[in-house]
Image (tube, helix red, strand yellow):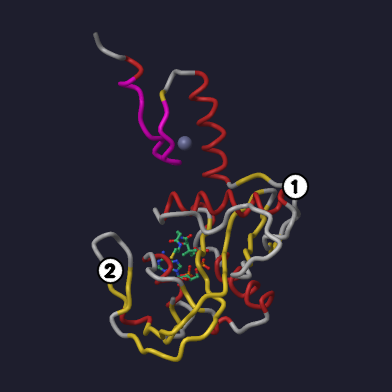
């Protein structure tokens, strides 16, 4: 006997969610996920940047957490860059920035203080077989603590409009450091390599 449901199961080409066409509950759940993944998580926060830590209200942390989950499923990193969780003492001094546009969260950047002892030349990054990009030329420096960008992500439909650029500048201002002073978590994805290269600085601290 042919299982009709199984035949109609498959990922949505736009949001990637796997569901069974024709099953009401599946379709309903897909439409919720689809709207969030394609249009961004809904929020009543006004347009602009919001900067959060693990002491921020949970309703705001959850916005960053949802964006981090979307970023993780796209980048296939092991874990999301931000989880909504109350912490009185955050040893990494996490600061996440999100961008709200027309009632939707459309971008995320996450930073933490990390130990850094390497400078890499952005022009020498090369891909591995998994799509991660690593520097071929590095210099070792004395180990020090440095605020590090661990994730930068913009909702697909909002890319190439300068949103990541505005977000990282706003984040640097909020963190009171120069943009060039952030370290960066490696490996990069190709999008990130192209984005950072566009900012015209070459020797970047990496973690
Ligand atoms: C990387 C990313 C955050 C860039 O966001 P964005 O808002 O599109 O970036 P901007 O519009 O601010 O880009 C500024 C400039 O960077 C360069 N740039 C950005 N993305 C690029 C890409 N994919 N290819 C080539 N150049 C790119 C361009 O020079 C661009 O200026 P232009 O559009 O006038 O040519 C986005 O592509 C993304 O979320 N990718 C998926 C998640 C990811 O890989 N994150 C990094 C994990 S290491
Ligand atoms: Zn979908």
To which residue does mark 1 refer? 44
Picture disc at residue 127: 2
> Dot 1, crowdedness within 10 Å: few (<14), some or many (≥20)?
few
The residues tagged by marks 2 and 1 sit, at their Cα atoms, a distance apart of 40 Å
Please say whether residue 193 is one of the residues in the magenta stretch: no
Q: Quadrant of the C terminus?
A: bottom left
* Residue 62 drawn at (x, y percent): 65, 49
Count of labels in the image:
2
Q: Residue at x 47, y 74 (%)?
A: 184
Q: Quadrant of residue 122?
A: bottom left
2 and 1 marks in contact (CB < 8 Å): no
Assess mark 1: CB under 8 A from ligand 1? Answer: no
Please say whether residue 14 is one of the residues in the magenta stretch: yes
The residue closer to the viewer here, 166 or 91, is: 91
Q: Secondary structure at mark 2?
A: strand
> Is residue 49 shown to the viewer in this render?
no
Vertical arrangement, residue 201 with respect to residue 5, above or below: below
Q: Residue at x 52, y 44 (%)?
A: 37
* Residue 206 drawn at (x, y percent): 43, 78
Vertical arrangement, residue 20 with respect to residue 187, above or below: above
**Residue 87 appears left or right of 157:** right
Q: Residue at x 54, y 79 (%)?
A: 182
* Residue 24 drawn at (x, y percent): 51, 18
The residue closer to the viewer here, 173 or 206, is: 206
The magenta segment: 6-19
Q: Quadrant of residue 171?
A: bottom right
> Is residue 50 shown to the viewer in this render?
yes
> Dot 2, crowdedness within 10 Å: few (<14), some or many (≥20)?
some
Q: Secondary structure at mark 1?
A: loop
The residue closer to the viewer here, 163 or 124, is: 124
């Amino acid at each position: 006997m042919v299982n009709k449901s199984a035949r109609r199961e498959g990922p949505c080409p736009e949001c990637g969610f796997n569901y069974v066409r024709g099953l009401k509950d599946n379709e309903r759940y897909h439409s919720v996920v689809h709207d969030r993944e394609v249009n961004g998580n809904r929020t009543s926060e006004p347009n602009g940047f919001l900067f959060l830590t693990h002491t921020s209200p949970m309703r705001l942390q959850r916005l960053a957490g949802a964006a981090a989950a979307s970023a993780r499923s796209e980048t296939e990193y092991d874990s999301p860059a931000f989880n909504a969780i109350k912490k009185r003492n955050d040893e990494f001094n996490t600061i996440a920035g999100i961008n709200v546009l027309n009632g939707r969260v459309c971008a995320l950047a996450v930073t933490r203080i990390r130990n850094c002892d390497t400078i890499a030349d952005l022009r020498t990054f090369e891909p591995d077989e998994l799509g991660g990009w690593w520097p071929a030329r590095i210099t070792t420096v004395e180990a020090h603590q440095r605020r590090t960008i661990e994730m930068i992500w913009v909702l697909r439909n909002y890319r190439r409009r300068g949103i990541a650029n505005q977000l990282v500048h706003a984040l640097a201002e909020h963190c009171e450091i120069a943009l060039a002073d952030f370290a960066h978590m490696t490996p990069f994805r190709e999008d990130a390599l192209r984005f950072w290269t566009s900012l015209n600085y070459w020797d970047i601290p990496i973690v």
